[in-house]
Image (tube, rainbow, N blue to C red):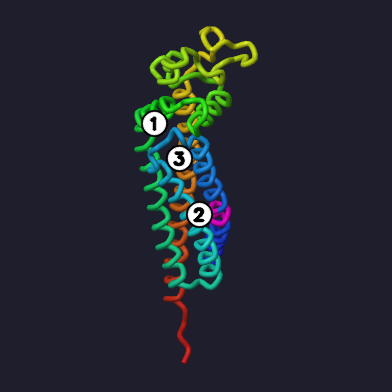
Amino acid sequence: MDCGICTSKTILLFLSLVFWGAGAALAYVGAYIIMSYRTFDNFVEDKQSLIPAGIIIITSVVMVIIGLVGCCSTLRESKFGLGCFFLVIVIVFAAEVTALAFIFIYQSKINQELQRSMNDTFSKFDGNNLETKAVNDLQSQLKCCGVVNYTSWHNTPWFEKNKTIPHSCCINTTQCTGTTPSQFYQEGCLEKVEKFLHDVLNYAMLVILGFAIIKFFGMLSVCVITCRSSRRSGYEPLYA
């Protein structure tokens, strides 16, 4: 076995292992995105935001299969197997590019859609329903008040009826009257939720981009080992 084939096989076997690791990492990223959106499920009505997560999880399963096919095909120098390996890598590469495009497009729409859905949820706050629990949990956990700030509550049916702002807005809930602005968190929840979702999507974009680069080198490695194998077999003597 010449040095070129040996090196190419080593690279391809290493990449097969990387694909297995990448599959596990992508599965984690996809699950993390879904869990992150579930945290704010009452405020994110656009379910298209979960499309990238779905693509990522499906891709992770395919990548484990890719690693297995790539490992077996490399060891056996199977042109058919390597051809399938190359084709699957191209498909997964396209899926990752698609996920990147979806994330990029959705990032530009987050603010407008999130503000609309949050305004709708905050307006349904009545002290007892599911929206009430979601809003209270959001404000307490993120230490925020209202959609834009505490004055956003002034436009809600809750404030018109009770003339107070919910205690989940208060810095100190035990000494809060619900009417004194200095007692409330000054930051709005929209900004904090938007920042959190942007951070999650940026993290996902970096991971996907990194694995897309790995796929590119994987395609190059398949080409190298296939061409070298074809060239080598062309010079081997034929015996009767």
Whichever of labels 3 and 1 marks the residue nearer the N terminus, that label is 1
Dot 3 alpha-carbon crowd within 10 angstroms: few under 14, some 14 to 19, many 20 or more: some
Q: Position of residue 180 (x, y in %)?
A: 53, 7
Which mark is in front, 3 or 1? 1
Which residue is depicted at the point 50% across and 41% down?
33
Furthest toward the right, the residue is: 174
Quadrant location of residue 160? Answer: top left
Q: Indicate which disc residue 60 carries.
A: 2
Which residue is depicted at the point 56% across and 47% down?
28
11 is within the stretch colored magenta: no
Q: Amino acid at mark 1?
A: Ser
Q: Where does the magenta region start and end?
A: 18-23
Which mark is in front, 1 or 2? 1
Q: Position of residue 153 (x, y in %)?
A: 44, 17
Most foreground residue, 106 or 16: 106
Q: Indicate which disc residue 142 carries.
A: none
Whichever of labels 1 and 2 marks the residue nearer the N terminus, that label is 2
Asked which secondary structure carries label 2, the reply is: helix
Q: Amino acid at mark 3?
A: Met
19 is within the stretch colored magenta: yes
Q: Main secondary structure of the magenta part?
A: helix
Cα separation between marks 1 and 2: 31 Å
Pointer 3 residue: 205
